[in-house]
């Protein structure tokens, strides 16, 4: 018997001066849309290491985890299939913002003037804002 399992992802929320860091997606799904930086957890990798790695790969920023924002598991949250994401609130420890890897751009947006976001990231941002206010 063959079983299907959801894929595990991580996303990072970084606030700076009442702004939030977003990346413009380079690849489908949601190519060209803005999203939180993040991606798939590699086999044998801790989720805490994965979120720090993904953020550095996409933004060139070194970060450290503050706390978990939440776990998001709606089977329809990703059109590629069922994914479960663990979302972390992080702080920048060093580096200069520069997009790379799976991002076409990376910048900070005023939390009150966000573009349309990919996936369920609008809901995630709302939850993250509740944690920091």
Image: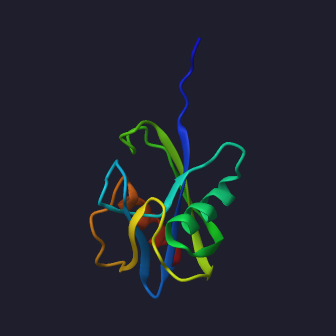
**Image vertical order of residue 112 relative to residue 48, above or below:** below
The number of discs equals 0
Which picture quadrant has residue 89?
Answer: bottom right
At a point 36% along the width and 78% down the height, the residue shown is 109
Q: Looking at the picture, tell me which residue is in the foreground, 78 or 23.
A: 23
Figure coloring: rainbow
Relative side of 61 to 103, left or right? right
Relative side of 109 to 87, left or right? left
| Farthest residue, direction front | 100
At a point 31% along the width and 79% down the height, the residue shown is 112
At a point 47% along the width and 76% down the height, the residue shown is 98
Q: Looking at the picture, tell me which residue is in the foreground, 98 or 132.
A: 98
Q: Quadrant of the N terminus?
A: top right
Q: Looking at the picture, tell me which residue is in the foreground, 58 or 36.
A: 58
Asked whether residue 118 appears in the rendered view, the answer is yes
Asked whether residue 126 appears in the rendered view, the answer is no
Which picture quadrant has residue 74?
Answer: top left
| Farthest residue, direction bottom | 17
| Farthest residue, direction top | 1
Give residue 106's position: percent from left, percent from top: 41, 73
Give residue 17's position: percent from left, percent from top: 46, 88
At a point 63% along the width and 57% down the height, the residue shown is 50
Relative side of 26 to 91, left or right? left
Give residue 51's position: percent from left, percent from top: 60, 60
Which picture quadrant has residue 32?
Answer: bottom left
Give residue 57's position: percent from left, percent from top: 55, 64
């Amino acid at each position: 018997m063959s079983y299907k399992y959801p894929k595990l992802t991580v996303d990072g929320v970084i606030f700076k001066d009442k702004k939030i860091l977003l990346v413009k997606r380079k690849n489908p799904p949601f190519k060209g849309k803005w999203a939180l930086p993040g991606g798939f957890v590699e086999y044998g990798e801790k989720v805490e290491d994965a979120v720090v790695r993904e953020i550095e790969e996409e933004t060139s920023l070194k970060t450290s985890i503050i706390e978990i924002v939440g776990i998001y598991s709606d089977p329809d949250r990703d059109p590629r299939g069922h994914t479960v994401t663990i979302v972390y609130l992080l702080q920048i420890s060093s580096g200069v913002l520069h997009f790379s890897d799976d991002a076409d751009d990376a910048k900070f947006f005023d939390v009150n003037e966000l573009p349309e976001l990919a996936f369920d990231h609008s809901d995630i941002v709302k939850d993250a804002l509740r944690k920091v206010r």
